[in-house]
Each structure stands twice: as structure tokens, then as C-alpha cells.
């Protein structure tokens, strides 16, 4: 089973754009790709959410599946409870991933918020899903102050739980990066012990599919290929140690 979990240091850091970029590169390389979003929050029925954004950026060749949607922009467990709807447990998410893996070469799991945001009232998290399917994790971070601390904390949790982390991607590189953002490029590999695989420009999510694929090839493909993944064949448990 070829699965990659895409998490972030928090919400709004560019997970959907990074997920879309990996999916676009894999589709262009001839892979059958599926994207799973266990829970979408802060979006009402009928409005476009993250999976719709992935579909728009990648095109009809990617299979997108959202397991639950809750209207309030809260942690999935809280949003589900307030909406009177059932939560998506790690077991439900794991079953969906395994089903999709039977018909796809690559399954990407995009989390909601950060790694330890609760999915259900029993404390299930995206980390539990990653462990259940033995999938490596990619961490998406913002550019600027706070990035080093938040990214290092996420990576430390992954190591503590024995989960592999393949590296870090900056999800929205600013057109005019400040000093903190520029320093992130050198400092992130030092504080995490992991490669900085690339960065995608701010506003990439508004591009056409053709433009977006070109941006993904410039910003992300070299870093992924440096890991020895070739045309996006993702497997194993990633890079776990420093």
C-alpha cells in the first residue's frame, strides 16, 4: 500500500495546495491517485471545500473522497458533537484508505488542522490513522516566525510515536519573504533533522491546472525526487531519525 499522510503545523498553512501538488505530479507520471480528507470543518454542504480544491487543481483523473463535513470551523470532534453528527474515527478513516488503496497506486491523506487535532471524543487523531496504515508523514509549515518551534514539535511527536516523516514543505512562500521566512530555509533542516523538500508560492491554489502543475514541478518535484521516490512512488516509513 502506497500511502502518504499530509499534516501541518496548524490550520491554514497550505496542506491542500501541497496535497494537490503531489497528486498532480503523480497523475502526470501516470499514477492512479486518490485523496482522502477524513473531516472537513468550517464549510457548509454545497460549498467548495478542500477536496473540491484538489479536484479543481489536479483535474478529473484524481479520485477525491471526503468522509465527513461539519459547518463550524472547529476541531472535527467538537464540530461533529455540536452539529449532532457522528465523528470520523481513525478506524473509519483507515478503512477508507485501505479500500482506495486496492484501486490506486497512491493514496494521500490530508488532515484537518495539525497532527493531534482530535477526530473523535475518544482522542483519535491523524497520527493514529498514520500508524494504522504504516504511512510516512509529510509536514506542511508556514514561512515566518513560529515555524521552527511548531514544526519541531510536530516532528518530535512523530518520532515519539515511531512514525516516519519524509520531510517538510513550506505551503505558501510569500512573494516578498521577510527575514524570518528567509531564515526558515536554512534553519528548518537543522531543528528538525529532516530535509526541506521545497516550497509552493502564495496564491498557487488560484492557478489553472496547467499553471499549477508547472509550479508543482518547480517547487516540489526536485525535493521529492532527491528522496529517491522517482515519479512519486511513495512507500516505506520515511526518515525517522536525526
Image: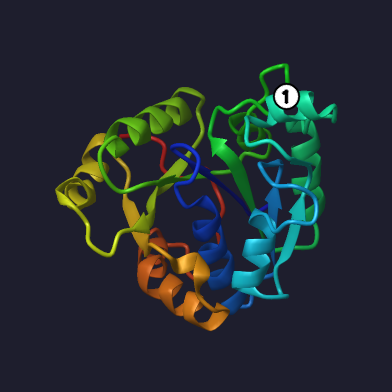
Residue lying at 73% horizontally and 60% vertically, measured from the top left: 64
The residue that mark 1 highlights is: 120
Residue 101 seen in the current view: no
Place of residue 7 in the rendered image (x, y in percent of width and height, measured from the top left): 52, 42
Quadrant housing the C terminus: top left
* Left or right: 141, with 179 as reference point: right
Q: Residue furthest top?
A: 122
The image quarter in which residue 121 lies = top right
Place of residue 68 in the rendered image (x, y in percent of width and height, measured from the top left): 78, 42
Residue 142 seen in the current view: yes
207 to 7, vertically: above or below: below
107 to 127, vertically: above or below: below
The image quarter in which residue 56 lies = bottom right
Along the line of sight, which residue is nearer the eye, 143 or 155? Answer: 143
Place of residue 139 in the rendered image (x, y in percent of width and height, measured from the top left): 44, 44
55 to 138, vertically: above or below: below
* Left or right: 159, with 233 as reference point: left
* Colour pattern: rainbow
Residue lying at 55% horizontally and 37% vertically, measured from the top left: 113
Residue lying at 69% horizontally and 62% vertically, measured from the top left: 52
Residue lying at 76% horizontally and 55% vertically, measured from the top left: 65
Bin the neighbour count of mark 1 within 10 Å (Cα to Cα): few under 14, some 14-19, many 20 and up.
many
Describe the element under mark 1 as helix, strand or loop.
loop
Q: How many marks?
A: 1
Amino acid at each position: 500500500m502506497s500511502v502518504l499522510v499530509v499534516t501541518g503545523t496548524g490550520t491554514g498553512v497550505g496542506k491542500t495546495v501541497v496535497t494537490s501538488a503531489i497528486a498532480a505530479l503523480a497523475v502526470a507520471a501516470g499514477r492512479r491517485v486518490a485523496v482522502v480528507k477524513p473531516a472537513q470543518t468550517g464549510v457548509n454542504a454545497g460549498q467548495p471545500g478542500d477536496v473540491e480544491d484538489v479536484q479543481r487543481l489536479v483535474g478529473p483523473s484524481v479520485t477525491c473522497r471526503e468522509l465527513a463535513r461539519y459547518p463550524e470551523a472547529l476541531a472535527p470532534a467538537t464540530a461533529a458533537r455540536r452539529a449532532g453528527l457522528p465523528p470520523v474515527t481513525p478506524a473509519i478513516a483507515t478503512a477508507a484508505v485501505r479500500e482506495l488503496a486496492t484501486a490506486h497506486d497512491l493514496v494521500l491523506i490530508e488532515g484537518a488542522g495539525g497532527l493531534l487535532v482530535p477526530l473523535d471524543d475518544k482522542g483519535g487523531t491523524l497520527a493514529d490513522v498514520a500508524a494504522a496504515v504504516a504511512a510516512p508523514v509529510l509536514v506542511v509549515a508556514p514561512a515566518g516566525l513560529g515555524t521552527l518551534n511548531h514544526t519541531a514539535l510536530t516532528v518530535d511527536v512523530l518520532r515519539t510515536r515511531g512514525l516516519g516523516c519524509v520531510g517538510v514543505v513550506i505551503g505558501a512562500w510569500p512573494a516578498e519573504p521577510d527575514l524570518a521566512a528567509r531564515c526558515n530555509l536554512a534553519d528548518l533542516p537543522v531543528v528538525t533533522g529532516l530535509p526541506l523538500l521545497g516550497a509552493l508560492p502564495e496564491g498557487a491554489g488560484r492557478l489553472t491546472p496547467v499553471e499549477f502543475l508547472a509550479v508543482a514541478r518547480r517547487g516540489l518535484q526536485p525535493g521529492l525526487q532527491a528522496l529517491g521516490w522517482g515519479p512519486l512512488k511513495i512507500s516505506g516509513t520515511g526518515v525517522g531519525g536525526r
